[in-house]
Image: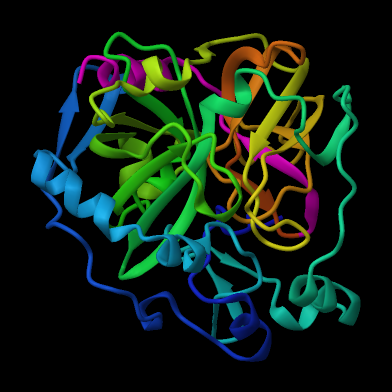
Amino acid sequence: MTLSTPLLAAAPLLAGLIGPTLLGAVPGPQQAGAPAAAHVRTAAAHSDIVEHVAARTPADQQRVLAYWTTERMARALPIGLLDVVTKGGKLVDDLTGRTSTRTTSDLTSEQAARRLMGAARPLAAARPDARTVGARWVTGGLVARTTGRVFLTVAGADFVCSASTVRSANKDVVVTAGHCVKDGVGEWAANWTFVPGYRTGGAHPYGQYTARRMFVAGPWSRSGDDNHDVGMVALATSGGKHVADAVGTQEIGFNSSRGGQAFGFGYPADPPYDGDHLVYCAGRLKDDPYGQTRDQGLGCDMTAGSSGGPWMTRFDPTTGKGTITSLSSFKYSDDQRTMYGPYFGDAAKALFNTAEHA
């Protein structure tokens, strides 16, 4: 078995279907602000943390906010488009260097049509299902405010991910996928901005929050280890408000029991989804059947753009409150109906403890 890309695209969808496109070849506007150097803090093997200073001053933050015009947000590519980036006839993960054996020729004409034109999806019922591979979340509650879209720039191209606020000492922390923060062994994301409660057409009812400090685990930064595909970001305030005060927070848990019921959320943008709506999956968690990671799988057909979206256990559909114990990370190339997420153990806990005091 081979892992798919960890939900990152580097070219428009149509280009992936009609010809090879590489990440470095995608034209993109100039990044706002210069990236700061990262440094490593090592207290113990499980708390090996790599940090990056992002938009550190009010002027830096304003440049990032000005960068994300409504038009630029609309053009941003979803992180995680599979079957798009080709090189020598193979799919290439530009973040970690992994290669999938599946090529665009594996797409059937029906799949290609779905990717080009999308497909209508029914709205979810007012009462959420305990088991679904993907439905629109229309129940509201806390999760509709705490989950949001992330906009970022990597190698000159603009992308989108998903993320969630978590309860933290500094009231500023959001959790997302590591590949939505740093491209494995490569560079850090620039212009990183979180839009909680994102609405159709780029509406941001609760403000836009730029990253001021970013954190990933050492194994992710050094080798793109999927077991550590977690990123914690400390945000700047928006309009003088901490993100926690503006939208509330979810709990975060570590070293939880494996298995059990979970709800996953995100903003998938690859057809049949459009990135404008919060979508959820729900079901029982299962271990990676191929033994390549310690991740757990959730039946879920969410697509590109859902990377980093929170997975919650002990979730109450009525209030929209739960405890985040994982997030959307990757899929295997021959199983597009199962999403995998990293287990939040001691390393993730150390990452969070550092971020909440940043």
Q: Nearer the viewer, residue 71 or 51?
A: 71
Q: Quadrant of residue 130?
A: top right
Q: Quadrant of residue 193?
A: top left
Does residue 109 belong to the magenta stretch? no
Circle count:
0
Does residue 352 belong to the magenta stretch? yes
Q: Residue furthest bottom?
A: 19
For image coordinates 79% across by 67% down, the residue present is: 118
Q: Is residue 108 shown left or right of residue 353?
A: right
Quarter of the figure with the C terminus: top left
Q: Quadrant of residue 139?
A: top right
Q: Is residue 161 shown left or right of residue 352?
A: right
Determine whether 103 is above or below 322 in the image.
below
Give the magenta range.
334-358
> Visible in this render: residue 107?
no
Determine whether 204 is above or below 107 in the image.
above
* Residue 239 pos. (x, y %): 26, 30
For image coordinates 29% across by 22% down, the residue present is: 241
Quarter of the figure with the N terminus: bottom right
* Residue 357 pos. (x, y %): 22, 14
